[in-house]
Amino acid sequence: MVIHSKEKKEQVQQQQQQQNLDPENPEAESSRCFCSAFSRLFSLTCVIFLVFSFATLFSGIFWLFPRRSLPRHHSSDIVHINASVQACFRLHKPTSELISKKGKLERDIFSSIDLRNNTKVTVLSLNQSDESNFTDVKFGVLSVHTNHTMRKDSLTSLRSSFVNLFAQRSNLNLTTSAFGEPTSFQVLKFPGGITVDPLGLEPVSGLLELLFSFTLDFSLSEIQEKVDLLKNQLELVLHLELFESFRVVLTNHEGSTVSPPVTVKGCVVLTMTTMESHIQERFDHLAQPPAKNFGLDNSVFGEVKGITYTTYPEGKVLDSDSVLAPTPTY
């Protein structure tokens, strides 16, 4: 009996194992599918949880450290107007701070220069300079009436203001708290040209002896930096006497202080009477052709072009300012 019972028990166990291994058994197949799906779901949940955890961790790490902003080159072309009069200067302010102050900047510029009521100032662009925290301001002056040109009297007074600003004989009076101190004033466009007296000499009256002119392939701004050397070399080539004086003016006919070329125009004036024989001797000397390159150092001033050289032995009593006065064309 015991033996038969044991055999029967073994037969039942074998039948159950076969049942579990039988692919035709639907209950077994369902059990296996459920276990596999549960396993996959559990694995996907773990992956999502891990990804979310790492994202939260890295986000927290970045927030613990101060964020740094990379330097950016600001540029704001505010308006596109072909103003016949244009100038620029530099402010020690970042461009981002100035854009919202455009209107105030225009009003400050207008009040700083000699403008008539029929003109207005428009800021054309604000560009961050190569130097950090500096902005190059470009502005135009134009008539308040659309499609109208500026009047000649307005241009005359404005030209004088621009020349004084360029030569640093006057300054733009901007609101210091908002804009700081402006520097590097330059004229970009001006109808009729721009003429500058680089030496800042007073006009002299007397007997006109010599009038000369030549062209240099430099800008007014570049020559202004070499003005002392220019003066010394011209004095040497002209062999000035104690009773003589000379003046020089520089003109850019396009009305720009930053673009070449420049016409150098000068005169020699006899400021006191002297012996007639000495005057004749001096005229004979001045009448000689000018030195090569007009006596200027070629390595500094380049090639001198378009030399004109006229003596006045008949003696004209003139004011040097009237002799060198520009004749602008509009």
Image (cartoon, rainbow, N blue to C red):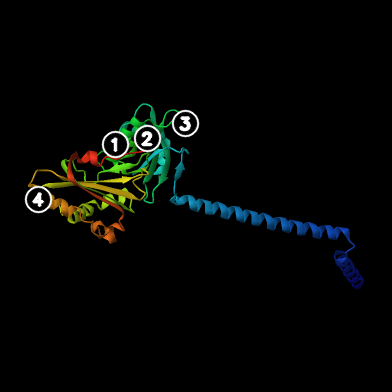
Q: Secondary structure at mark 3?
A: loop
**Where does the image place residue 159, in percent across and percent down from the top left?**
32, 37
Q: Is residue 176 visible?
A: no
**Where does the image place residue 238, in percent across and percent down from the top left?**
18, 53
Sequence-first tag of 1 and 4: 1
Q: Is residue 282 visible?
A: yes
Graded by Cα atoms within 10 Å as few (under 14), some (14 to 19) or many (20 or more), the crowding at tag 3 reads few
- Label 1 sits on residue: 160
Between 265 and 283, the one nearer to me in the picture: 283
Amino acid type of the residue tagged 2 in the rendering: Leu
Check residue 147 in the rendering and tell me which mark sits there, or answer none. 3
Q: Quadrant of residue 164?
A: top left
Q: Secondary structure at mark 4?
A: helix
**Where does the image place residue 113, in percent across and percent down from the top left?**
31, 33
Check residue 105 in the rendering and tell me which mark sits there, or answer none. 2
**Where does the image place residue 2, in percent across and percent down from the top left?**
89, 71
CA–CA distance in space, label 2 to label 1: 21 Å
Residue at the image position 19 percent from the left and 39 percent from the top? 318
CA–CA distance in space, label 3 to label 4: 59 Å
* 129 is higher (above) or lower (below) than 39: above
| Image quarter in which the N terminus is found | bottom right
Residue at the image position 31 percent from the left and 45 percent from the top? 251
Amino acid type of the residue tagged 4 in the rendering: His
CA–CA distance in space, label 1 to label 3: 24 Å
CA–CA distance in space, label 1 to label 4: 39 Å
Amino acid type of the residue tagged 3 in the rendering: Asn
Given this view, does label 3 or label 4 mark the residue nearer the observer? 4
Q: Secondary structure at mark 1?
A: helix
Given this view, does label 1 or label 4 mark the residue nearer the observer? 4
Between 278 and 156, the one nearer to me in the picture: 278
- Label 4 sits on residue: 278
